[in-house]
Amino acid sequence: MKPGIFLAIAMVALSLLSLFVGVIPIVPSDLLHDAAAWELMRDSRLPRTLAVVIAGGALAVCGALLQSMVRNHFVEPMTTGTGQGAALGILVTTWFLPDASLLLKLSVAAATALIASAGVLLIVQRLPPRQPLLIPLVGLIYGGVLGAGVTFIAYQADLLQYIDVWMNGEFSGVLRGRYELLWGAALVAALTYVTADQFAILGLGRSASINLGLNYRQVMAMGLLAISVVTALVVVTAGAIPFLGLVVPNIVARYAGDNLRRTLPMIAGGGAALVLASDSSGRLLRHSFEVPAGTVMGILGAAVFLWLLYRPKSYAL
Amino acid sequence: MRSNPLFLLGLGLAACMVLYMTVGVSGGWSFVLPFRAGKLAGLLLVAVAISTATVLFQTVSGNRILTPSIMGFDALYGLILTALVFFLGAQTAVRLPPVALFALNTTGLMAGAVLLFGTLIAQTRTDLLRMILTGIIFATLFRALTLFWQRMIDPNEFQIIQVASYARFNRIETDLLPLAALLSFAALAVVWRKRRQWDVLALGHDAATNLGLRVRQQTILALLLVAALVSVSTALVGPVAFLGLLVVSLARLCDGSETHARLLPIAALISAITLIGGQLVMEHALSLSTPLSVVVDLLGGLLFFFLLLKGRSR
Amino acid sequence: MILIRNLSHTIAGKPILHDISLDVPRSGITALIGPNGAGKSTLLSLMARLMPRQQGQITLDGHDISTHDTAALARTLAILPQIQDAAPRLSVADLVAFGRYPHSRGRLTVEDHQIIDRALDAFHLTDLRNRALETLSGGQRQNALLAMIFAQGTDYLLLDEPLNNLDIAAARGLMAQLRRLANDQGRTIVIVLHDINYALAYADHLVVMAKGGIAATGTPSEVVTEDLIHRIYGTDAAIITHQDRRIVDVGP
């Protein structure tokens, strides 16, 4: 079966699952006569499912973007500084302007995420190209140090409990009226698809890009902006979902190759499917207590990362 | 400093210890002294355990940038603890004396260390970056699994056993001190006795084999010792992320000889001064509410980053 | 002597050695030559028990090296190890001193110190004895390692392409040193060489390997013929005789 079709079916199936599972079980027939069920669906289930799909798809796409930008298959924005940068922005806003609107929080978070991402890019570009594992390593440490800094500030601001919330993404708080900004991420992802070729060329290297007439700096800046905005949006709405952007593009590349124009929709679909699965299983695993999607993704993502690192034909390296 | 760092460091430590015991005492001495003595003993134990575990781990993994906690040892400790609570049932776990839980946990950690890191070191020894990356992913995986299991345990029950996510040097589990001290003295004695063998091991697999050392066997023994020491320190104060790297790097600056006979005591002294002196400073001099461990982690993390980029991992 | 019987070895699924049987004679220099990928380094590593044996048997003076006590073996057999990055601040003297470890376990006697000094002298390291390894050139570091295994005082010495980083003076010096050890002290030296001419000039016994098997063994003059070079290396090179010695003409 072609990977694209498989993904499409998976997405539909998982979305339906997501709509109907939860603390209060709903069966499709309920919707026909029970007004409360409809309300639940409209106010909670549907927004939640949409949020999961958008977040998953957009994050996976951003992973692919970052991988093109640093020319390495083992990175993704959430763990390499962008995610921590966004958390820092939210923290600072909450500390100094506790009544700030969601939009303001988002803007600050996007800005700090951008600065953090620019930082890691600057460092990574100076690394010796002969050691491909150095890039993901430096990225992870950079993210870790930034995360420690965020914890330090949280301590000063007496906001430590919020750190846990942001660092472990979950969608249980997503309700109608509280998630709409996330559609911005869908917009960014769509725009990325339109410019997919440019990012694919970017992945070939600086000289190749310039040789093919690409405005290298401009495309890099676009990519930087895209991943910062999307990451900030997801962190503000739900929290951090680690490793998604790393794992999905690699798996898709294994089955469908590296042509971004062709694979980007699949990457988005794969990301959506994976987070749907994480979120739904988080609801199912233990009755009446939810396991955050971020935690499930952390386990899955780390395990797959290890597999990617050790599988025999690591063409990614 | 070069002339005799041991002497100067020893003096420094003595000063710190005296200050720790005497500064800012309000209330009866007969209460304060034993109370502080307990905490001091705990800090000393943790300091020596961490520095020794780090030196030993760096020897068997063949580099100067890795530490047990970067590789996920203390995250594994937290995972095993959570798993124990999950499988025993929180009710049973809370009725166990803390010493029993600690003993179970240490055994689990030692087994896990040999299985996981023994294989890892044997297979990826020559590829340092892959090893570090794997360690970091392990640590992330263990923490995620710990969080997962915490959620699976009934939240009402979970309050009973808290798995710390960072170390607290001002709150030490003093009821564990006797067993912890026993275990660490035993481990430290073994480490010290074999100090010349660690020197040979540090030359690398081929050279050590050539000189007649059973590399695999010694590596496993070293990992067991590291696990025991990490278990002690994690049980007493919680996961200490970058303290080891910080103090051992400083120790290497102080001591040019590269032999374990000098490195081990120097690192232990620097570690003790950092912890006790640092605690003194945090508690009395500065009024930051941040625990010492966050500061140490931040500094150590930056150091790690710097070492990695500089390529001075050797 | 070293006896190898039916030794086969696979690495990561790829067969490297096929059913090798070989006798390495005592006393003297045995050179292992052959094209790249023939399995020479693997064979040497197996002889030095650096890798676990898979199939076949290797005995040294009657002991099976895979079961014999490794510490005891270290007093009889030494292999020149790779220490590219280990302990760069170690001093030369300290490194060479490690060569005595199998004998004295770290507690150096007066005799040990004499042996260490002789080793340093033999490899022109006396003036460099207190320098840190990382401050030395590649050739000097190689000499330090050679001094270390020299100090180890073993009957058997295994060396894997030790001439690679050495200029002609250093290379000839090393080969002459090995020649002396074999002649004066009766040591057995097995050396993997890239350059056939060094083998022709210094070895008593030659083993030619190709594609994981042994193509020929014997004295250099018996073994190295134009036909062999053509068969094994796939190139045509003439053999010249100069003052009783045979030399391969590497010119076009």
Image (cartoon, coloured by chain):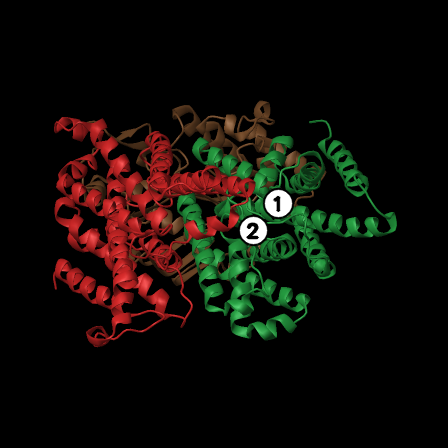
Chain colours: A red, B green, C brown
Q: Is residue B118 left or right of residue C250?
A: right
User: At 57% from the left edge and 64% from the top edge, which residue is drawn?
Assistant: B159
Q: Could you confirm whether marks 1 and 2 are on the same chain?
A: no
Numbered disc 1: secondary structure = helix
> Which residue is at the front of the view, C145 or B265?
B265
Q: Is residue A246 left or right of residue A94?
A: left
Q: Is residue A315 left or right of residue C220?
A: left
Q: Give me the chain letter of mark 2.
A: B
**Mark sitting on residue B212:** 2
Task: State the residue lying farthest toward the top.
Answer: C127
Q: Amino acid at mark 2?
A: Gly
User: At 44% from the left edge and 54% from the top edge, which residue is drawn?
Assistant: B138
Location of residue C69 (image quadrant):
bottom right
**Mark sitting on residue C101:** 1
Evaluate whether residue A9 shows in this view.
Answer: yes
Q: Amino acid at mark 1?
A: Tyr
User: At 53% from the left edge and 46% from the top edge, which residue is drawn?
Assistant: B67
The reply to whether dot 1 and dot 2 touch (C-beta < 8 Å) is yes
- Does residue A291 lie above or below C36 as drawn? below
